[in-house]
Amino acid sequence: MTEIMIHKQQHVIESSYRYEECGKSFYGRGELDNHIHQIHGILGGVRITQQVLPVMRRRKSGRIINVSSVGGLAGYPFSAAYCSTKFALEGLSESLSYEVEQFGITIILVEPGLVASDFHNNVRMAAKKGAAKSDSQYLQLMQKLFEEYKHVQEYYQISAKEVAKVILNAAILDNPDQRYIVGKYSEMMAERKMTMSDTEYYNMMKNQLFGGKWQ
């Protein structure tokens, strides 16, 4: 029987946008606190992997499924902590895959985008708690992002069940892919990341997130 490990990193909302620290971007205390929480998340995945690898090596079989995100393919404003740890998870998975293949172990990345949840509303509610007190120079830009992102979310969101089906298939298929891009939004962003120049992609992201051009 093949040993299977699935790692899904949790993320924290309140600490990123709390109280008077709302909107101070990466250098605010709230975002720094969030970054620390996110680092603990990726380190937790590393520690779990370290625990299961000896068993998998002995059995000459194993499958590690890491749930990443579209935020592991591209950086997003006001998500520095989240995206940087997803980038780390991507690099960890790709690098480790070469090392453990000799033991019959497969590393798989699942990259969903815009899964239907209360994520957007939770961020807005947490941000509003500090909006009245905040003197942040980023606040106006953050509010603009929230409004535009809501439309992106509504148009492209996918269900958690859809992601779960992909994870299940990755776990049970005889010859799974090394990467599963889940949802139209993730597929679109991955394709644009590969085909656009850096400048084109950067301008496209600004138009999508701040300019209302989200299709």
Image: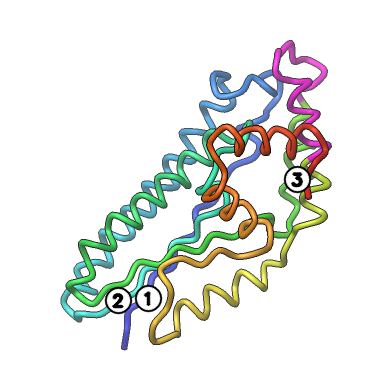
Q: Which residue is disc 2 drawn over?
A: 62
Cα separation, mark 1 vs mark 3, equals 31 Å
Cα separation, mark 1 vs mark 2, equals 6 Å
Quarter of the N terminus within the rendering:
bottom left
Measured along the vertical axis of the image, is residue 42 above or below residue 210?
Answer: below
Q: Which residue is disc 3 drawn over?
A: 120
Measured along the vertical axis of the image, is residue 20 above or below residue 4?
Answer: above
In front of the other: 49 or 154: 154
| Residue drawn at (60%, 39%) of the image | 201
Give the secondary structure at mark 3: helix
Q: Is residue 152 covered in magenta?
A: no
Q: Amino acid at mark 1?
A: Ile
Q: Residues within 10 Å of mark 2 (few under 14, many from 20)?
A: many
Q: Which residue is disc 1 drawn over?
A: 4
Question: Percent x, y for residue 7?
Answer: 44, 62
Q: Are marks 1 and 2 in contact (CB under 8 Å)?
A: yes
Q: Amino acid at mark 3?
A: His
Q: Is residue 148 left or right of residue 205?
A: right
Q: How many marks?
A: 3
Question: Percent x, y for residue 116?
Answer: 74, 59
From the image, give the main secondary structure of the stretch colored magenta. Answer: helix
Give the secondary structure at mark 1: strand
